[in-house]
Amino acid sequence: MVSDLSYNLIVLAGDRGANDPLAGALGVPRKGLLPLLKRPMLSYVLEAGQKAKNIHQIYVVANDVDSIKAGLPSNVSSDQAFQFIEGANSPVQTVQKVLQDIEMPALLVTADNPLLTSETLDDFIEESSSLDGDLAVGFAAKSDVLRDFPDAKRTFIKLGVEGYTGTNMFALKNDNVFHVLGFWRGIEQQRKKALKLVWAFGFWNLIKVLLGFTNLEKAMQDASRVLRAKVQAIVVKDTALSMDVDKVADIAPVERVLAERHQKGR
């Protein structure tokens, strides 16, 4: 039985295989195996999950599990702490498939977020557990991100006086998240296009965003009505979570943070 402060962790490690631009450019078979300081990117995420005190079981989901396991160190690929599951045709379909077989609450993260730490996982779970919603979504504030990473090139949506970007962290708390996944499945091809995503939530909600008539809390309330599930935002303290690795240009700043952490013994 998973308790309120013990979440299952789902790590999405899928990609476009040989057609994935990041994997192809660097000659690795899967994006999650991209070497960062000579370690597969996915291994940093798995290490964070294994060290977190509030994680129950870790599920690694990919569209070619065998190649993922073959590219990880043998002590990781054979570790009973990790269950490897073959994914479906898209990220949303994959999450729907996994949630049919595991217990919630669950925390969803991605393999391209190697700056994730065990402390951040635990903090997110603790804050999510204190909320009464169905789904908690992680955001980073623009002012915080640019303070810590002045050269960061991220997509921010302005809500009130602040801009926000996603962190690829989602706390899935109960079966109402299936309403959210059904909606998301219809728009997931637009997930990198901020205004098209907002448009999917309705014309007037888009107008409120464009004219600055809403803030993060009100935007979550509007989204909840559309999604038929109570969605709440968690603004993370660790702005490094906004620095996922989607393109070759993302590698250098992420490796710089990893190297600094190594020097500090983190």
Image: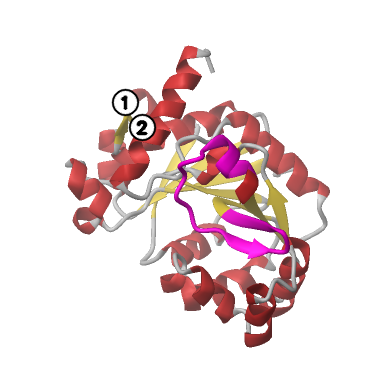
The quarter of the image holding the N terminus is top right
Secondary structure of the residue carrying numbered label 2: helix
Q: Amino acid at mark 1?
A: Ser
Q: Nearer the viewer, residue 254 or 14?
A: 254
Q: CA distance from mark 1 to mark 2?
A: 5 Å
Seen at 54% across and 38% down, the residue is: 240
Q: Quadrant of residue 133?
A: bottom right
Indicate yes or no whether the magenta region holds residue 146.
Answer: yes
In the picture, the disc for residue 74 is 1
Give x and y (percent) for residue 162.
68, 56
Seen at 42% across and 21% down, the residue is: 259
Secondary structure of the residue carrying numbered label 1: helix
Q: Is residue 157 above or below residue 24?
A: below
Seen at 57% across and 35% down, the residue is: 148
In the picture, the disc for residue 99 is none
In the picture, the disc for residue 77 is 2
Assess disc 1: are there few (<14), some (14-19) or many (≥20) residues with their C-alpha within 10 Å of its C-alpha.
Answer: few
Give x and y (percent) for residue 14.
36, 53
Q: Is residue 65 above or below residue 37?
A: below
Q: Is residue 4 visible?
A: no
The quarter of the image holding the C terminus is top right
Assess disc 2: are there few (<14), some (14-19) or many (≥20) residues with their C-alpha within 10 Å of its C-alpha.
Answer: some
Give x and y (percent) for residue 67.
25, 43
Q: Are marks 1 and 2 in contact (CB under 8 Å)?
A: yes
Is residue 132 found left or right of 62 in the rendered image?
A: right
The magenta segment is 144-165
